[in-house]
Amino acid sequence: MKKIFFLTLLMLYSVIGSAQDVKPTYYNFLYKVDEDDTFASILRLYVKDDAVINKKTPLVLKNIKNNPQVKDWTNLVPGTLISVYIPEDMMDMSKYQSKQAIVYTKNEETKKVIMAKISPPNGFKGSIFYMASWGDFSQSSEGTTVNYKQNSLITLGLQGNYFPKDSLYSFSSSVYFSSFTAAETTLPPKSVKLPAEIGFNFYGDYLWKKPRISWQAGLDYEKFSAFNIEGIYNDQQIYLDRVSVIYATVGVSHVFYILEKPFFIKASLSKSVSSTTTTEYTASTKKESLTGTKALFYLNYKFTDKFFLHTMLKVHTMSGPSDLSSTRLGVGVGYILF
């Protein structure tokens, strides 16, 4: 499990390192002329504040040359589409981020970044996803320790987002269902059948423009299985607990680019605020439930307009009738419905 995780990180770092060697010469994007726009005012929307602009600068000459459809630069017609070129050393990256989406392309001479002008998303967005995952668990109490694996070949989920029009706030939610193969333990019986795990979350999101990251806060719900260590110690046989936990969650997410490809990354930290346990071991004297924290790291790569690959690393650290720690790594694919 640890080898898989470290190999994944090593591959990611090597890709990032190679991506740093490639730098675009120009930023090139389409701009739709609005009322009262002038040539200079359009350029000032994207260049650094101290950039020098006059009719003899290469910046101005390049834009005129590549827009032959514009006959009079002193009297731009509203609605006209112009192709804007900004040199990399003059580009103020923070100015376009709230209105532009980056799409990469190549030609024979240079590598350019085309930023297609878009409207902020609004309305409902939804997707479905599949994931397979591998989990290492450890529970201990009163000198008894159980190490086991919980692997899931099938996790299915549904995710939705709502973006109010012209707002930096949005809402997101997801629900999932995980079917497990038998838990592999160090105790007899070696294999224990586990019921499914289910989860649900609901977040409020806020887009922070500089830097362009999104903050999240909300609630998570998980229902999962754990071993009852007291029953194992007293009866020398396996008993399962069903644990239901509600977490308060905060997180941060960001979109970045590696080798011309868009990636979405998210990290979150959750703290339990409510927890209940149902156990098979009826003679249990420990009535408390598991409480603690959960950390989640998520990476998403959209490789077509509709399909994406994703991976996640989830870590639990909990205490109560026993001390529980778990690490789960998952990989899968998703499809954007709308």
Image (cartoon, rainbow, N blue to C red):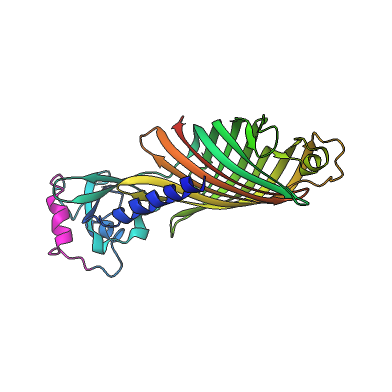
Q: Nearer the viewer, residue 94 or 159?
A: 159
Compared across the picture, whether 2 is left or right of 26 comes to right
- Identified at 21% across, 56% down, the residue is 25
Residue 308, percent across and down?
42, 36
Residue 258 visible to the viewer: yes
Quarter of the image where the C terminus is located = top left
Task: Determine whether 17 is above or below 240 in the image.
Answer: below
Q: Nearer the viewer, residue 258 or 140?
A: 140
Q: How many marks overall?
A: 0
Residue 62, percent across and down?
14, 55
Residue 166 visible to the viewer: no
Residue 92 occupies which quadrant of the picture? Answer: bottom left
What range of the chain is rendered magenta? 52-69
Task: Determine whether 231 is above or below 141 in the image.
Answer: above
Residue 195 occupies which quadrant of the picture? Answer: top right
Instruction: Answer whether residue 62 is magenta in the image.
Output: yes
Task: Determine whether 236 is above or below 207 in the image.
Answer: above
Instruction: Answer whether residue 148 is magenta in the image.
Output: no
- Identified at 76% across, 43% down, the residue is 229
Residue 285 occupies which quadrant of the picture? Answer: top right
- Identified at 70% across, 34% down, the residue is 188
Q: Nearer the viewer, residue 57 or 97?
A: 97
Q: Nearer the viewer, residue 244 or 228?
A: 228
Residue 218, percent across and down?
63, 48
Residue 128, percent across and down?
50, 31
Question: Which residue is farthest bottom?
Answer: 50
